[in-house]
Amino acid sequence: MSLINTEIIPFKATAYHNGKFVPVSNENFKGKWSVVVFYPADFTFVCPTELGDLADNYAEFQKLGVEIYGVSTDTHFTHKAWHDTSDTIRKVQYPLVGDPSGQLARAFQVMIEEGEDAGLAYRGTFVIDPEGKIKTIEVHDNGIGRDAAELLRRVKAAQYVAAHPGEVCPAKWTEGAETLKPSFDLVGKI
Amino acid sequence: MSLINTEIIPFKATAYHNGKFVPVSNENFKGKWSVVVFYPADFTFVCPTELGDLADNYAEFQKLGVEIYGVSTDTHFTHKAWHDTSDTIRKVQYPLVGDPSGQLARAFQVMIEEGEDAGLAYRGTFVIDPEGKIKTIEVHDNGIGRDAAELLRRVKAAQYVAAHPGEVCPAKWTEGAETLKPSFDLVGKI
Amino acid sequence: MSLINTEIIPFKATAYHNGKFVPVSNENFKGKWSVVVFYPADFTFVCPTELGDLADNYAEFQKLGVEIYGVSTDTHFTHKAWHDTSDTIRKVQYPLVGDPSGQLARAFQVMIEEGEDAGLAYRGTFVIDPEGKIKTIEVHDNGIGRDAAELLRRVKAAQYVAAHPGEVCPAKWTEGAETLKPSFDLVGKI
Amino acid sequence: MSLINTEIIPFKATAYHNGKFVPVSNENFKGKWSVVVFYPADFTFVCPTELGDLADNYAEFQKLGVEIYGVSTDTHFTHKAWHDTSDTIRKVQYPLVGDPSGQLARAFQVMIEEGEDAGLAYRGTFVIDPEGKIKTIEVHDNGIGRDAAELLRRVKAAQYVAAHPGEVCPAKWTEGAETLKPSFDLVGKI
Amino acid sequence: MSLINTEIIPFKATAYHNGKFVPVSNENFKGKWSVVVFYPADFTFVCPTELGDLADNYAEFQKLGVEIYGVSTDTHFTHKAWHDTSDTIRKVQYPLVGDPSGQLARAFQVMIEEGEDAGLAYRGTFVIDPEGKIKTIEVHDNGIGRDAAELLRRVKAAQYVAAHPGEVCPAKWTEGAETLKPSFDLVGKI
Amino acid sequence: MSLINTEIIPFKATAYHNGKFVPVSNENFKGKWSVVVFYPADFTFVCPTELGDLADNYAEFQKLGVEIYGVSTDTHFTHKAWHDTSDTIRKVQYPLVGDPSGQLARAFQVMIEEGEDAGLAYRGTFVIDPEGKIKTIEVHDNGIGRDAAELLRRVKAAQYVAAHPGEVCPAKWTEGAETLKPSFDLVGKI
Amino acid sequence: MSLINTEIIPFKATAYHNGKFVPVSNENFKGKWSVVVFYPADFTFVCPTELGDLADNYAEFQKLGVEIYGVSTDTHFTHKAWHDTSDTIRKVQYPLVGDPSGQLARAFQVMIEEGEDAGLAYRGTFVIDPEGKIKTIEVHDNGIGRDAAELLRRVKAAQYVAAHPGEVCPAKWTEGAETLKPSFDLVGKI
Amino acid sequence: MSLINTEIIPFKATAYHNGKFVPVSNENFKGKWSVVVFYPADFTFVCPTELGDLADNYAEFQKLGVEIYGVSTDTHFTHKAWHDTSDTIRKVQYPLVGDPSGQLARAFQVMIEEGEDAGLAYRGTFVIDPEGKIKTIEVHDNGIGRDAAELLRRVKAAQYVAAHPGEVCPAKWTEGAETLKPSFDLVGKI
Amino acid sequence: MSLINTEIIPFKATAYHNGKFVPVSNENFKGKWSVVVFYPADFTFVCPTELGDLADNYAEFQKLGVEIYGVSTDTHFTHKAWHDTSDTIRKVQYPLVGDPSGQLARAFQVMIEEGEDAGLAYRGTFVIDPEGKIKTIEVHDNGIGRDAAELLRRVKAAQYVAAHPGEVCPAKWTEGAETLKPSFDLVGKI
Amino acid sequence: MSLINTEIIPFKATAYHNGKFVPVSNENFKGKWSVVVFYPADFTFVCPTELGDLADNYAEFQKLGVEIYGVSTDTHFTHKAWHDTSDTIRKVQYPLVGDPSGQLARAFQVMIEEGEDAGLAYRGTFVIDPEGKIKTIEVHDNGIGRDAAELLRRVKAAQYVAAHPGEVCPAKWTEGAETLKPSFDLVGKI
């Protein structure tokens, strides 16, 4: 079954955020837009570039009222240590959630269950609306990096559609572009 | 469980392709890169813009040796009729696969099982390698369009990584950009 | 078990009807006679001739207080598109119900579950009384067309019998012809 | 699941046929076209008119190489007795099969399992091809008689389609009328 | 488990009785003695002689307050037809119950489930007391006829024992003969 | 299911017979006609009169090649003791089988499983043919005695039918009386 | 699991006792000491000597307030007959319980379930206290007789222990002999 | 089910025997008579008197070719310690088997599973023949001592019966006394 | 699953303690620190040295408010006997709990279930806090002795941590040594 | 069931060891003594002191032929990062095994499955012999540190016992101290 439009599971976790350890739970997802970004492991290769890319765009996500949650199956202790020692990760201002039990990775169907990476997560990105429902899914096999700009476009499209019932965003829609207003007369006419 | 790295299921279907009805099966996926693009239904709104966007970029996908398969739960008859009547769809030169039994939509976990759109597919895009294994997943709730340019970037990254064992593509990597060569010494250093 | 005298299942669907998309449900079947006509798919071969044949006789069905529902596993979008482009279908004034999830085709046991037509419906015609109970069943393998005149005869017989308890319609009964009044003395005497 | 295109079950039964008791089994259905006609019970009302109607058309069915089998859950003894005493039934020259165990009525899904007619069969007519596969189904609730002429039309259509692969019979097709030759170019053009 | 002393199941059926079709149910068995006589089929060989034998003795059964029910898996229509055409059956004044669903034949464990007589009943005779409890069972394979005189003897013995608690009928007891009064002192003394 | 035409189960038991203890098993039933006569218990009331009645007719059964087996759930020790002390039982020349484990009573469905007679058998009489198959069943509730003369008639009928395939014994048939030869022309004529 | 200290099951049976048939149930075991003595069968060999041995000691058991119940899987009828004919059994003044259904033999785990003695009981003796709880078990294979004197010793020991909490009877204790008063200081000192 | 005539289970254990630790297994039971004597626990009250009573009679058991095995759920270490410290136990010359896992106590159904003595064994004595089959069972609730003399009598009876097929030991039989030779003529005569 | 932080099961047992038999249950563990020390068996080799080592340190455990419970699968009778006869065990002033049913050994997962020591316990030591929760586990294979000094260190550490929330004891911590106060700034700094 | 004497499960993992990533599997445990040391997480508090304590004693373990494996549910990447940044961990010369899937933590029953530390391991230490069998278990709740000196003592005792069959190490045994030679005469004498 598709995860699209399903609600985030109840959970409790600890994140490293702005020099502190803070609790994070499904309650944080209520009432605002969120992005959950899984990556395989701290202290590895593609991961910091992706987290850094998001960090560089974080201000814009904030402007859209969107919180970003970085998640790996590492502990929050390791997240702090990585933050302390990596120049790239030091830029990260959004919470890095520890998921050592894999509760989140399994709920979002990104847990690697077999092989030499068993226990790590695939690179999965999820846009979640203020009702806690998943609106977009993106998962890459581990060598393939994601692009924060595309994520931004997708978030804006999701927000636009949510805010404008009766309109839909066409392909490669970007902020300010025209949308479609589905109407009976359009059927079979595009 | 994640679909990443799982193999496409055995199937048989009929597609409308370049003015003909042609059989398509899992055998077509062996030995070349493929992209499977689900969309909810023929004769609807976002769908033709997405298929048109892919059509506009089709030459470049072809250059990369990639075949695109558009799939909805409509029949191949309906695909032809849409092609005959829609200016946008008339541009589509890749196969449009009929999936009226939903065998493909269910296998790729994009089938909508409940509500007023039950029986239609979510907008899902899958990059599949020449072994028939899924390398990337992207699924949007139905109002949110996709971007062919981002898909192209993703395909190139997947191909690059497959062709260069020992290198990985960092975030927002584009063709020609530097990759990372994971090495012991890089651990904890990025 | 036979479907005869079983009640139509609860369902919700969308139909194309007289230039609009309208909701259809089991509630529509209460209190009036109905005919449900399944056909394999829009934009195919036998189907339009059958739907046209019914369209030509629709006035007479209407006079009998009978609504006709054409159903295929296509969407209502496709039904509209077909209506817009086919001269034959343009004549159809009764609702064309979209059943992309196959809920109706499975309930009436006309779904093709295997083979190259999997996901399509067989040609099934069902006369349903004002209590929502199925009174006659007719299903043809897909190359064999039906005849609206025979359906009309069958509907009239069903209505006559319902209206005249204690009478039954003999073979090839047509409107106005004599019926039989089963009585004890007739047993073994015909 | 639909009975269309399923094969007749293996069975053994005894029929009254032309003044004799003869064995009938699924073997009789191999290599020629057959029609199986269920009716509720011997010595009842609608039944003899239907059987008589078929008797009147039997010569034509014979010309088409079709055997008719009348079946009720009565015994072959009762069939003979009815034949001996009823003027209508005396005309019947096709076999009347006894099905007191209900094996055939259940296999063709026409058995009435509850209510005051439990143990009798609904009025079901089945056209079966020379491979023993069911090609058309017609079942009426018990007060509603069938029409042998329509059955004849249906048999001819089924035979025509079987003999002319690549052609299909449109609605209200009758012998000699034009058929349709499905071709790619017709899609969406009728 | 033995059927002796078990109660007749709840049932509803239709019987041919004295020129009418009448309902029969387990309620008819309350408050009076009954005999249920199964036979294989109407219009067969041994059957009419047995039914006739009972008819000849019916007056005496009536004097004892006993109703007789003839039962086969034929319908009540067939029972009437048989009555109309057979000199022997015309004598029958007790109800002939139709059991086409086999509900009674199965409840009394006389249904033939396999072989060429499947669907017919064995020749079973059951004496039932005014509480609806089975007091005697007699079942013959189908070629072997029963004797109404012995049944009469058995009914009288059953009635005598029911009416005289503390007495039992010895072997070959007939009306008026001595019975045994079981007492402690008789133990081991007969 | 009916016991008629089922085969006697494999068993081993010990009988008192003509002043000796002898083994009895299902092997004894092969190749000759047998009668199995259950009775509730030794040293009780109706039982000896029934066993005596059979003893009086034993010579005639012997002439027909029939062995009689008296069976209760008592032991063979008790059978001997009863034989030694009862004038009636002293006449018994056929085997009295001990069935303290109830293996036979349960196989013939005459075991009383509940109430104050639990562990005893009902009065059941079974005629068994030389293949070990049960041809007639007779079971009485415990106060009602059986009649050896009727049993003799029944055995003769069973033997006659077995010896004359194609003939059946009508009601109250006795040795020497006419039988019926079922033929097609008799159907519906008796 | 051991039967020791488990309670006698609820049961109803009939016994031969002092020239009468009397009901016996688990209620009889409440409030007084009892001995239950199983033996294989009436009219056999070891059995009467054992029952006679108990009869000879019955007065002493009575003085101790103990009732004895002889039990076999024979009926109470057979018990009476045995009593009437055996000089040894005539001496028995305690109840002989009929257990033809084997309810007691199975509850006390002395039923022989297989082999040529299937349906008989082993020689089991059980001392039961006034709460209905089993205090001693003795079971012998069938050739080996028991000794009433040893049973008497065992009953007295059981009664003594019950009456003197805090004392236990040493090996070969007999009435009047010293008992042991378990105390802490005795541990490891005997 | 009764343990009588069942075979001792396969087991391995360690015993204290004549100043040594020796292995004991089911193999020791083959080819000679054995007595297994369970008692609750070492260093308790009734136990040593019973073991001492057996010790006093051990020479006589030996003469009969019988080995005695004392068993409790204590270890063989504890058995040795008890032997070293108790004057009574010091007399014991037969093996004292350690059963701390309770394998033997459970197999002989003497394990106390609940209450304050859970984990200890009831006082059970078993005579076992040279085939390893249990011939007599004796179990006492824990306060009630056994008597070695009665055990000796029982062993002799078991041995006599085994050695003299066709004879059985009557009640209170002792060595040298007469036995019974069961014969047909004795039935009902004792 | 780990036993750490699980609560001791409800149980009832008897211990030998200071010259008396005393009841011990899970209630004893509430409100004070406890140590449970399993050992294989009384009267064996390593065991007394371990119990003696604990006895030598018992005063110090008492000062810490800790009760020690020695447990083996022997009975309390054997514990007393061992205490009476062993110079080492005579020093033991803490309770020696009898666990012949193995309820405690199984609950603490130290029961040996197979092999020649089946039914004995491994050498397991458990520190339990005043809520009855297990805080440390130590289990040795049977030849390897434990050290009371290390146990004392472990108890003190457990008590210190319980008493000083927010502090943890580093490796080889001993009473009076510094502890660690986990704080955010220490993460990654030790 | 106890883990003592069970064999280490088959597994594959990656460890950080002496500046390299190396594979570790159950094969490494064959043929030499090993110690497996679980700790909750890298970059936490007690953990480095314990790992440092082991590092300080590593030379001595090496002399004994013992390899140490530090294991947490962190990845080997994190282990390297910790090693690079922590002065204490920099001293560690034994492998640090990554167990992000928890396969080892679950197999050794030290996984924390619930609460805020879910996904981390308890502090467990296991001595494993050259056959891969666990000889000692030590698990502490997370605040309580272990002592490498005690572990060393325990390893030496385990090695001594393995090398000297027939000797056992008494409590607080240290290298060079006397052992016990279990012999029959010692039973009950220590």
Image: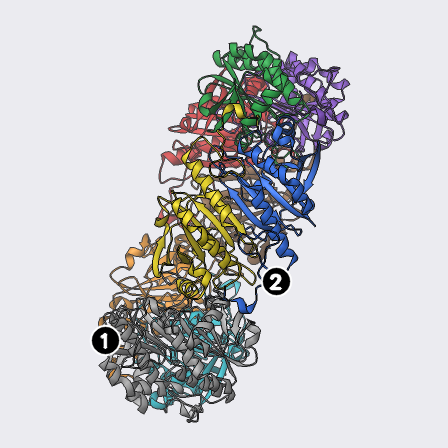
Chain colours: C yellow, D blue, E green, F purple, G red, H brown, I orange, J cyan
The image position of residue G127, as x and y in percent, is: 46, 33
Measuring from the top left, give residue I152's x and y in whole percent: 31, 72
Above or below: residue C76 compared with residue F122: below
- Amino acid carrying label 2: it is Gly
- Quick check: I44 above or below D68? below
- Residue E160 in percent (x, y) is at 52, 11
Residue nearest the observer in this picture, H102 or J99: J99
Q: Residue at x 44, y 20 (%)?
A: E30
Q: Chain of mark 2?
A: D
Indicate which label's residue lies in the foreground, 2 or 1: 2
Report how far apart the C-alphas of labels 2 and 1 lie in the structure.
84 Å
According to the picture, the residue beneath numbered tag 2 turns out to be: D166
What residue did someone put label 1 on?
I166
Q: On the rendered structure, is J86 left or right of F174?
A: left
Q: Is C148 above or below relative to F100? A: below
Residue in front for this viewpoint, E138 or G183: E138
Q: At numbered mark 2, what does the secondary structure look like: helix, strand or loop?
A: loop
User: What is the secondary structure assignment of the residue under circle 1?
Assistant: loop
Quadrant placement of the C terminus of chain J: bottom left
Of residues C49 and F5, the one drawn nearer to the viewer in this rendering: C49
